[in-house]
Image (spheres, rainbow, N blue to C red):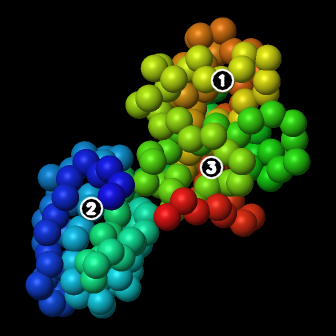
Amino acid sequence: MLKADIQLDTKGLACPMPIVKTKKAMEDLVDGEILEVQATDKGSKADLAAWAGNIGHQYIGTIEENEILYHYIRKCSKDINVEETFEYTISIEEITGRPGVILDVREEIEYAFGHIEGAISIPLGELDARIKELDMDTEIYVICRTGKRSEMAAHKLANAGFNKVYNVLPGMTAWKGELTKNI
């Protein structure tokens, strides 16, 4: 299974209990953390996706294994504030077909459920330990969901001596192209 910050077992419960328990569990998470909801109610797939969207959380996706549904939901603040403080930015439309590397700094779960083909996955929390995997002479287009994490990653790379770094705005929320999945 994919790594989540918190697991919630709602197996054997029918509607509306998976949503009720998910709502309560989300209150205890901090912004950005991922909840894994384990359910057997087939209706939970549509219910949890709709609920998360209405509330403003990110419904990442569902994996079904042995009749158990594993739902992944990221807690999001109600306001999406894209900070454009990193000096070099590029729009998501401009990265298509450009030479260089797309560095996806979202969590492994988010990347697995859909990423730009050819993108390299290094979650922001692993960037310091894995920075040597990147070539300093290659243009690097850093992307996340909205531009927040990618901006932090772009600063880290610039502080480490990378000179060809661009923060991709607004992020995967605006991507209209095909997605590659690893699930």
Are circles 3 and 1 on residues that touch, CB within 8 Å?
Answer: no
Place residue 85 in its image quadrant: top right
Is residue 130 placed above or below 175 in the rendered structure?
above
Rendered location of residue 176, percent (x, y): 72, 65
Q: Which mark is residue 36?
A: 2
Name which residue lies at 59% across and 17% down: 132
Earlier along the polypeptide chain: callout 1 or callout 2? Answer: 2
Q: In the image, which is nearer the foreground, mark 3 or mark 2?
A: 2
* C-alpha separation, residue under disc 3 versus residue under disc 1: 20 Å
Tell me the crowding category of disc 1: few under 14, some 14 to 19, or many 20 or more residues within 10 angstroms, Cα based: some
Name which residue lies at 52% across and 52% down: 111
Q: Nearer the viewer, residue 103 or 150?
A: 103
The residue to which callout 1 is attached is: 134
Residue 172: tell me if it is visible: yes
Are circles 3 and 2 on residues that touch, CB within 8 Å?
Answer: no
Drawn side of residue 167 relative to residue 153, left or right: right
Earlier along the polypeptide chain: callout 3 or callout 2? Answer: 2
Q: Nearer the viewer, residue 146 or 81?
A: 146
Q: Which mark is residue 171?
A: 3
Q: Secondary structure at mark 3?
A: loop
Q: Which mark is residue 85?
A: none
Residue 82: tell me if it is visible: no
Is residue 172 placed above or below 162 in the rendered structure?
below
Are circles 1 and 2 on residues that touch, CB within 8 Å?
Answer: no
Rendered location of residue 45, percent (x, y): 35, 82
Drawn side of residue 21 relative to residue 126, left or right: left
Rendered location of residue 123, percent (x, y): 48, 37
Drawn side of residue 126 relative to residue 86, left or right: left
* C-alpha separation, residue under disc 1 versus residue under disc 2: 31 Å
Tell me the crowding category of disc 3: few under 14, some 14 to 19, or many 20 or more residues within 10 angstroms, Cα based: many
